[in-house]
Image: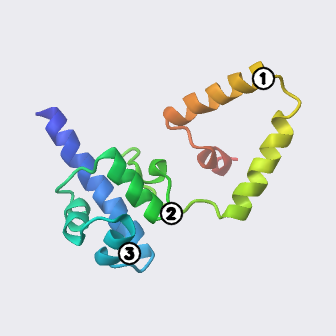
């Protein structure tokens, strides 16, 4: 029974995040459905928390809303709906990272990549760390 309750809670939190992000963009459920190649009634069920989306649908909706899945995944009872960085910011960030790792060996680069992946899987968000400064 606890797993069923957790699924309902997760469905509700994701649905609230989808709806908030959609409204933030001024879109109707029909517009979001069209952008995701889903039906408006399915979007409505998701936003009400009546359905838990599959991983594929979760990715489709996140992409349509220009979000990362991790940005809408509930953390500590809240869902964040921050937009992705714009491409020029992202390109500049990638260029800075490449300059930092360029002199490293392949082994050092793999070690750093693995460490960052572990941190992200654990829910560590770099933006949160920057805000604490």
Q: CA distance from mark 3 to mark 2?
A: 13 Å
Considering the numbered disc 1 on the image, is that residue within a helix, a strand or a loop?
Answer: helix
Circles 3 and 2: CB atoms closer than 8 Å = no
Whether residue 59 is visible here, answered yes or no, is yes
State whether residue 2 is above or below residue 88: above
Whether residue 78 is visible here, answered yes or no, is no
Q: Residues within 10 Å of mark 3 (few under 14, many from 20)?
A: few
Q: Where residue 60 appears, x then y in whole percent?
A: 39, 57
Q: Earlier in the sequence, mark 3 or mark 2?
A: 3
Q: Where residue 44 appears, x then y in whole percent?
A: 22, 68
Q: Earlier in the sequence, mark 3 or mark 1?
A: 3
The residue positioned 45% from the left and 56% from the top of the image is: 80
Circles 3 and 1: CB atoms closer than 8 Å = no
Name the residue at the top extreme. Answer: 107
Q: CA distance from mark 3 to mark 1?
A: 45 Å
Q: Which residue is mark 3?
A: 23
Q: Which residue is mark 2?
A: 66
Q: Which residue is mark 1?
A: 106
State whether residue 87 is above or below residue 54: below
Q: Where residue 97 appears, x then y in whole percent?
A: 78, 42
Residue 107 as seen in the image, left or right of residue 34: right
Q: Earlier in the sequence, mark 1 or mark 2?
A: 2
The residue positioned 19% from the left and 54% from the top of the image is: 51
Residue 2 as seen in the image, left or right of residue 108: left
Considering the numbered disc 3 on the image, is that residue within a helix, a strand or a loop?
Answer: helix
The residue positioned 21% from the left and 64% from the top of the image is: 42
Q: CA distance from mark 1 to mark 2?
A: 32 Å
Q: From the viewer's perspective, is the residue at label 3 or at label 1 nearer?
A: 1
Circles 1 and 2: CB atoms closer than 8 Å = no
Q: Which mark is residue 33?
A: none
Pick whichever, 43 or 36, lies toward us: 36
State whether residue 85 is above or below residue 106: below
């Amino acid at each position: 029974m606890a797993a069923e309750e957790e699924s309902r809670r997760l469905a509700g939190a994701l649905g609230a995040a989808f709806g908030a992000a959609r409204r933030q963009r001024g879109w109707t459920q029909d517009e979001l459905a069209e952008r995701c190649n889903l039906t408006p009634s399915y979007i409505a069920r998701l936003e009400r928390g009546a359905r838990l989306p599959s991983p594929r649908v979760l990715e489709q909706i996140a992409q349509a809303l220009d979000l990362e899945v991790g940005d809408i995944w509930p953390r500590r009872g809240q869902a964040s709906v921050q937009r992705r960085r714009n491409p020029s910011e992202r390109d500049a960030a990638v260029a800075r990272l490449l300059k930092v790792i360029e002199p490293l060996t392949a082994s050092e680069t793999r070690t750093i990549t693995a460490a960052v992946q572990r941190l992200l899987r654990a829910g560590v968000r770099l933006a949160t760390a920057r805000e604490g400064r």
